[in-house]
Amino acid sequence: MRIILLTQYFFPETGAPQNRLGALAEYLANKHEVHVITAMPNYPALKIFPEYEGKLAFSETKDGYQIHRVPLHVNGKGFIDRLRTYITFSINAAAYTKELFGKEPFDIVFCESPPLFLGYWAVKLAKRFKAKLVFNVSDLWPESVEKLGLVTNKLLLAPFYMLENWLYKKSDLITGQTQGICDSIRTKLQKGKNTPVHWYPNGIDLSEIHQIDVNDSLVDQFKNKKIVLYAGNLGYAQGLEVITQAAANIKDQPEVHFVIIGDGPERDKLEAQVLNNQQNNCTLLSSVSRKELFSLIKSSFAYIVPLKKIELFLGAIPSKIFEPLAFGVPVLLGVDGEAKNIFCNSYNAALYFEPENSNDLLLQLYKLLHDDNLRTKIAINGKNVIAQQFNRAVIHSQLEKKLIQINAQ
């Protein structure tokens, strides 16, 4: 098959979509022709990476597939600035793809959302290339911005909901990262086209995990400390105040050190909170290399996976949970709903704390500090759930079968 993978977020950026789609492109490239249409790398700092500054559209090769990059507007972190970023990338990606391939036939156009606007051009490109459209939903947009309270104007949101429903009906296959996302999409499709919906979860490459050694200066920085780690986007949705509050309230465990790694719109606020607490048991670091991050995860005593306490996240499975579980690092999970049911209730592979409740977070942490048998047990269970449910080799094989199936129709 000839496949176009259309995504704003991609390597060398780090994050759930980037990791998932990079692994998918590499997997598919072993049997198929794959072209990735993406943006100049800029996430999460929202600054074009230095090695890409000043470049216009260009192509490069990686792991047997082609990456075609286009420019976009990157300036500011507010909602309007984000819309400008989404729209400029979507328009430039569509224009460059048409220029690059003309009307060459393709079999699959695989579109990553958000940005939702990219789906409009994916429909047009699929028609132009006589391809089947696969629309992947990693975040229910615009539901997420509405339920997070970032946009509350119903009139402003209405066109986006109309676009969302239109894209679902135009797709030949819809994939979603969680069962909750898939169920929501199926509900919206009940009165329209019976588009098939496939659960395509984030996962992890276990072969990569097994190759990681702990030996770098970042780990040495926290020598003799029990590291309690968070690594990822420093955004509003994560509710990271729960970590700074926990650090401020823990009084009798000097060996415990909280580490927050990442960049994002909430970074300045978190830095101010750490400074105001006047304690030296919490450190904020900017994004680090994947190798450094894996080394630090593997060396950690525990790993925190938090989200805000809102209904939207009852169907969320944060992808940052996979690495610590695969390494056998106990997870403190502040996410209710689907994630809690899988990792805490079904597999006993994590300890649950109420989202945004720093006292409950500390209570679960104390359990790990005082019960080595519990820590060992949930570490073993964590490795098991990853191997059984979130192994990328299995996930990609199942998705490939779906792509072959819709292409044959």
Image: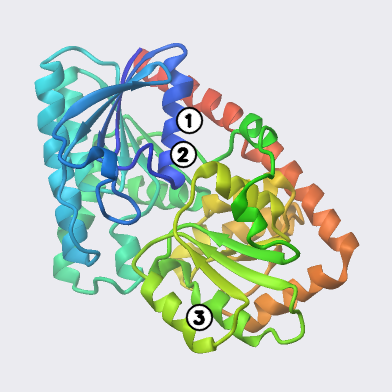
Label 1, label 2: how many angstroms apart (C-alpha)? 6 Å
Which one is earlier in the sequence, the residue at label 2 or at label 3?
2
Out of 157 and 148, give the one closest to the viewer: 148
Q: Nearer the viewer, mark 3 or mark 1?
A: 3
Q: Answer with mark 3 or mark 1, whichever residue precedes in sequence.
A: 1
Seen at 69% across and 78% down, the residue is 362
The residue tagged 1 is 23
The residue sitting at 36% across, 19% down in the picture is 65
Tell me what residue is drawn at x 49 percent, y 45 percent: 289
**Residue at the image position 38 percent from the left and 36 percent from the top:** 11
Residue picked out by circle 3: 274
Residue type, mark 2 in image: Asn
Image quarter (top left, top right, bottom left or bottom right) of the C terminus: top left
Please name the amino acid that badge 3 sits on.
Val
Residue beneath label 2, please?
19
| Quadrant in the picture for residue 286 | bottom left
Q: In this view, does 401 lie above or below 391?
A: above
Local secondary structure at mark 2: helix
